[in-house]
Image: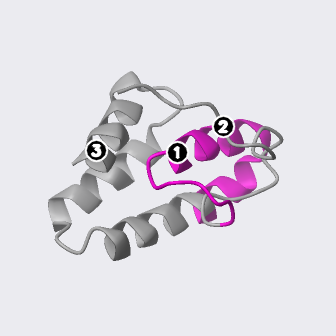
Amino acid sequence: MGIRPLPAGAEDGQHGAGELPVGLGDAPAVCVTMRKAEPDRFERAALRWLARFCVERRDVTLAEVQSAAWAFENITDEPAALETLQRLCAR
């Protein structure tokens, strides 16, 4: 499963992962863009994604939340980070 193109309006990093009408699986790509364009807003966007992940995946485990948090911490320099988020979204 690859990353889908960003939705319109996301390329400039002006919106957080919780502010765009994107699916849970698309939000990490928005966060990557934000981390590069506006790093000071990245952490809040990642936290919003984690909260959304917990709400939408009612059976989520603490281990999965920890994996997702690790992935966001390492999303720009660790290829396995984005793969981890994709795997979590696909289940």
- According to the picture, the residue beneath numbered tag 2 turns out to be 6
Residue at 33% from the left image edge and 27% from the top image edge: 80
Dot 1 crowding, Cα within 10 Å, few <14, some 14–19, many 20+? many
Say what secondary structure mark 2 lies in: loop
Question: How far apart are labels 1 and 3 at the CA level?
Answer: 11 Å
Please tell me which of labels 2 and 1 falls first in the chain. 2
Residue 79 placed where, x, y %?
Answer: 40, 23
Question: How far apart are labels 3 and 2 at the CA level?
Answer: 18 Å
Classify residue 67 as left or right of residue 30.
left
- According to the picture, the residue beneath numbered tag 3 turns out to be 90
**Above or below, comparing residue 69 to residue 54 in the picture:** above
Query: Is residue 68 one of those drawn in magenta?
Result: no
- According to the picture, the residue beneath numbered tag 1 turns out to be 26
Residue at 20% from the left image edge and 67% from the top image edge: 60
Query: Is residue 37 one of those drawn in magenta?
Result: yes
What amino acid is labelled 3 in the image?
Ala
**Above or below, comparing residue 88 to residue 3 in the picture:** below
Q: Are marks 2 and 1 in contact (CB under 8 Å)?
A: yes
**Above or below, comparing residue 32 to residue 63 in the picture:** above
Dot 3 crowding, Cα within 10 Å, few <14, some 14–19, many 20+? few
**Above or below, comparing residue 48 to residue 7 in the picture:** below
Residue 64 placed where, x, y %?
Answer: 21, 57
Q: Are marks 1 and 3 in contact (CB under 8 Å)?
A: no
What amino acid is labelled 2 in the image?
Leu
Mark drawn on residue 4: none
Residue at 71% from the left image edge and 36% from the top image edge: 36
